[in-house]
Amino acid sequence: MPDPAELTAIRGPLDVALVQGELRRRTSGWPQPQILSTVESTNAEVIAAAHQGAAEGLIVVAEEQTSGRGRFDRSWTSPRGAGLTLSVLLRPAPPMATWGWLPIAAGVALLTVVRELSDVDVILKWPNDLLLGPDRGKAAGILAESDAGAVAIGIGLNVSTTTDELPTGGTSLLAHGALVSREALLVELVTSLEFWYTAWADAAGDAEGSGLRAAYIPCCATLGRAVTVHLPAGDVLRGTAEGIDFSGGLQVRTEDGVLTTVVAADVVHVRRPDD
C-alpha cells in the first residue's frame, strides 16, 4: 500500500492534455471529454447537456462527485482523485427495446480495459457490476439513465481507494495491488466503449450480430449460477440464471420450472460449496 505522500501523488489531477491528445488520435469523432473538478452527478450533467442539444459522445469526467448514484438510487462515493468517474451521452437509433445492451456494452468495455491494464482477476455480475479477486468484491458500478431520446451511461471505478475508504463489500484496483494510471484507464475505456457502441448501433441493436453478446457471455459470472433476484416491487425470485435475451434481460429458470426474464433487479449469487 502506498504511503500518504505516494497516495497524494497517485491522486493528482488528470492530465487533460494527455487524455485529449490520445483520444483525438484513437477515436473517430466523439467530442473531447470535459474534465471537471467537482460535480453533484456526472449523469445529471450529461442529461442536462442532452436537453440543450449536446452531441452524441459527450463525456463528462469528474475528479470528485458529491451526489453520485448507482442502481436503485444507492449512493456511490469516492475520495477526490481516487476513482474514475464519468458519464457518456448516447443518442441511440436502434429500437428502445434493445437499449438494455448499452450498460452491458459499458461493462464489457470496462472489464476489457481492467484486464488489459492489470493482473487482477475480473468478472461481471449481471448486468455490469465489476467484481475483482477471489472474494468478488465490487470495484465498479454502471448506471444507465434515459431521457428525451438520449441515454447517459455513468461509470464509477474504484482505482486507488484504500481498504479503509471502501464500503462494505467494495474493493479497488489498489486493494488488489494494481497501480494503474487513471489517464490510461480513461483513454482505453472511451476507446473500447466507442467500439462496442458503434458495432451495436451499426447492427441495429442486434447484440448477436454485433458480437456484443458473444463477448459478454464468457465474462458474466451470473450465468449458470443459482441466484436470488430481488425485484423493484419487493418480490423475490429464486432459480438458476440460464441466459440473456435479445433486450439484455436476464433469463431465470425459477424453482417451479418457469423461465422468467428480469430487466431491472438486484441479483444475488447463491454461494456454491467451492466458492
Image (spheres, helix red, strand yellow):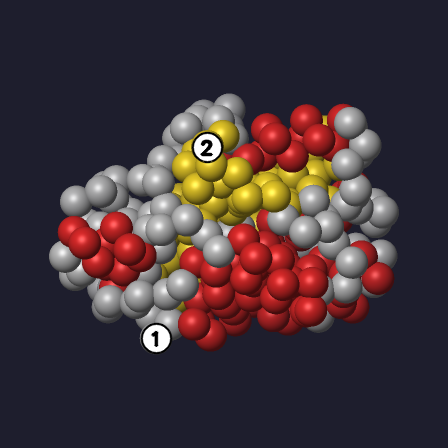
Distance between the alpha carbons at the discs numbered 2 and 1 = 31 Å
Q: Residue at x 18, y 60 (%)?
A: 2
Return the residue at label 1.
Answer: 119
Q: Front-most of 102 and 1?
A: 1
Q: Nearer the viewer, mark 2 or mark 1?
A: 2
Residue 164 in picture, x, y percent from top left? 17, 45
Residue 61 in picture, x, y percent from top left? 54, 44
Question: As shown in the figure, which amino acid type bears the numbered disc 2?
Answer: Thr
Taking 111 as reference, is 153 left or right?
A: right
Considering the numbered disc 2 on the image, is that residue within a helix, a strand or a loop? strand
**Quarter-of-image position of residue 167:** top left
Q: Is residue 230 above or below residue 197?
A: above
Q: Earlier in the sequence, mark 2 or mark 1?
A: 2
Taking 148 as reference, is 73 left or right?
A: left
Q: Residue at x 36, y 51 (%)?
A: 12
Q: Which mark is residue 38?
A: 2
